[in-house]
Amino acid sequence: MPKGLPEMNVATKPSRILDSRLFSKVMTAAEAAALIPDGATVGMSGFTGAGYPKAVPIELAKRIDAEHAQGRPFKVKVWTGASTAPELDGALAKVDGIEMRLPYQSDPTCRKRINAGEMEYIDIHLSHVAQTVWFGFLGKLDVAVVEVAGITEDGLLIPSSSIGNNKTWLDCADKIILEVNAWQSLALAGMHDIYYGTDRPPHRKPIPMVTAHDRIGQPFFRVDPSKIVAIVETDAHDRNTAFTAPDATSKKIAHHIIDFLDHEVKMGRLPANLLPLQSGVGNVANAVMADLEHGHFEDLTAYTEVLQDGMLNLIRSGKLTHASATALSLSEEATKEFLDNIDFYRERIVLRPQEISNHPEVIRRLGIIAMNGMIEADIYGNVNSTHIMGTSIMNGIGGSGDFARNAYISFFMTPSVAKGGAISCIVPMVSHVDHTEHDVQVIVTEQGLADLRGLSPKARAKAVIANCAHPTFKPALEEYVDRAMHYSPGRHTPHILDEAFTFMPNWMAAQRAREAWKVESLVQADAWS
């Protein structure tokens, strides 16, 4: 597959627009981008680098850049399903074209602008986005820009490699711009399950799902053709997510989780084939899937938001019989495997809107085993998934809160140290709280696993330090707890508040020392030269 930005070349493939009513709406990406005004709120498709529009955002960025060059203001608000790719977030952020972004991002330019105070960002639980839009809490949605694989003769839209919030964007937007991507396989048709039964209170009804592979909707998006103002034909690949082979740390974390699941089965708290699995994105998650692939568990199922390489391998091995998600997030190699054998995978994978894939009611009913990454955890079980030093956003909470709060068992995983061992990921008090101690059941590092279920705060602190902290930092954490037991005004959750963040200043001081050393070294080098 080509690297970098895709080339738009559709001349060699037949049109996938079969509804004759829409032929007159076909135009170039630049012409479509011209229909998006300054100040518009734009709902774009895309979830973890899959199914995002690949042509219109680039042309919109060019237009914004030209307007800025003329001294005219031009920014838009951007809503998506989750993270996207350089052709969308990156292109718009580089020209300072995004006024506000939600609900999740992972683009380095976006992140830099957000943390510099140049772009507003709202970090939302992924299951909450669609209903928040329907409730009108975020204001009006002006334009939807949605990628699809094709349009049927009766105007139904064939979804592409992610669903995300696309149903909501298509329903709520005043105007719709479609990108019909010839790279996306038409054999995806039938893999999707678009549920149209979510009403607003007080008319909500239970979501009729009792297994991870239940189908409760229809395979296509419905759309009002009168709202479609432009259709752009493209032929461009998704952003492939490259994963390195699991390292020693990831493998140790995975082994601890598998041992724990074995123990839960033996204790009668899990069935022999476990319960539906949810796994966040990353190498640790892939390491867990690799262990399951080569382990003794059979007849597994998954109910997750993103399906990545490890889970695809688990399906191919026969260990995982069915998987439900809202998007794919595959490497180049895994993408080829998926497309080459799509008929096989279509019988075993279902893609849903994220308001269903992440729905708290369904997660709790199915009894999900949730495994998500974190930046740091504190000794009492609070978890920070989003912020560095309490003030700078990394990516966002994503769906981890949807699953953690409602899972049958909720794991949070991280290496015990970061920055080459300079900073502990187990701290006295997290600098930002995304998941409180009430929603965190198991913490895992390469050092070990702390089962926090049924433990009081002081017992949790003892378990977390003993099992999860790196030996370099363990004595300091133990000393902190001992002194907190003596000096804290309350002994239920002992803290010395003016020392609770000592690990962070120490790391910052070390960073300043390293920077000073670099400057001194440069000065000496100049003197010697």
Image (cartoon, grey):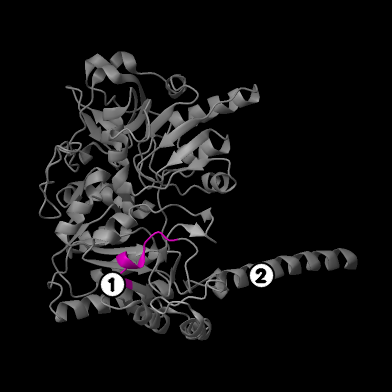
| Boundaries of the magenta span | 433-442
Q: Which mark is residue 509?
A: 2
Mark 1 or 2 closer to N-term? 1
Marker count (numbered) = 2
Residue toward you, 275 or 180: 275
Residue toward you, 100 or 369: 100
Residue at the spot of label 1 = 291
Cα distance in 3D space between marks 1 and 2: 39 Å
Residue toward you, 327 or 233: 327
Seen at 20% across and 36% down, the residue is 200
Q: Position of residue 342 (x, y in %)?
A: 22, 47
Q: Is residue 213 left or right of residue 122?
A: left
Q: Amino acid at mark 1?
A: Asp
Q: Position of residue 435 (x, y in %)?
A: 37, 61
Cβ–Cβ under 8 Å for marks 1 and 2: no
Q: Position of residue 407 (x, y in %)?
A: 23, 62
Residue toward you, 205 or 470: 205
Residue 522, compared with residue 104, is above or below; it is below
Q: Position of residue 433 (x, y in %)?
A: 43, 61
